[in-house]
Image (cartoon, rainbow, N blue to C red):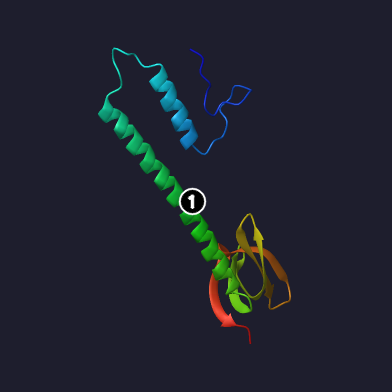
Amino acid sequence: MATTGLGISSGGSVAQTRGITQQDFLRILSTQLTFQDPLKPIDNQQFMAQMAQFSSLEQTRMSNEKLDTLLAQQAANQSLGLIGKTVEVATASGNVPGQVTTISFAGGQPMLTVKSASGELMTGVSLTQVALVRGSAT
């Protein structure tokens, strides 16, 4: 019986995968049905339980992807609202106040550029580094 491995690269090591896909599941299922023992067929209840479990896992995966997208959009909207506001940025030497001047996106994540009172530009500031938002600069 010739079968192909899932998640195996040509080098023989396990490839990094996000998990089993619907196509992978159907391929496994059809292989299982093709090579089952005719004298001991798969139990219908067990078969339906496997189908329901896979369906539930697929729905959970899709919900997680949609939630990740929603969180990324919320972070983008939140960062856009910070333009022109005075914030305190948490640094290794303490909180540094400054005004948010621009927003850029790196890897889908918003990165702020903050101009401190001394005129220094802090680039690549993530939302998690913002310790306090004071409002518009005066």
Where does residue 120 sit, x and y in percent of width and height? 73, 72
- Under mark 1, the amino acid is Glu
Q: Residue at x 33, y 38 (%)?
A: 52
Q: Residue at x 58, y 69 (%)?
A: 79
> Neighbour class for label 1 at 10 Å: few (<14), some, many (≥20)?
few
Nearer the observer, 112 or 35? 35
Q: Quadrant of the C terminus?
A: bottom right
In the image, 99: left or right of 39?
right
In the rendered image of this protein, does residue 137 appear above or below residue 54?
Answer: below
In the rendered image of this protein, does residue 84 appear above or below residue 138?
Answer: above
In the rendered image of this protein, does residue 13 appear above or below residue 110?
Answer: above
Where does residue 137 sit, x and y in percent of width and height? 63, 83
Q: Does residue 15 appear anywhere in the picture?
A: yes
Q: How many marks?
A: 1
Q: Residue at x 45, y 48 (%)?
A: 62
Nearer the observer, 60 or 48? 48
Where does residue 17 sit, x and y in percent of width and height? 54, 36
Residue where numbered disc 1 is placed: 65
The secondary structure type at the circle numbered 1 is helix
Nearer the observer, 60 or 118? 60
In the rendered image of this protein, does residue 29 appear above or below residue 83?
Answer: above
Residue 125 appears in which quarter of the rendering?
bottom right
Q: Residue at x 43, y 25 (%)?
A: 30
Residue 13 appears in which quarter of the rendering?
top right
Q: Does residue 20 appear anywhere in the picture?
A: no
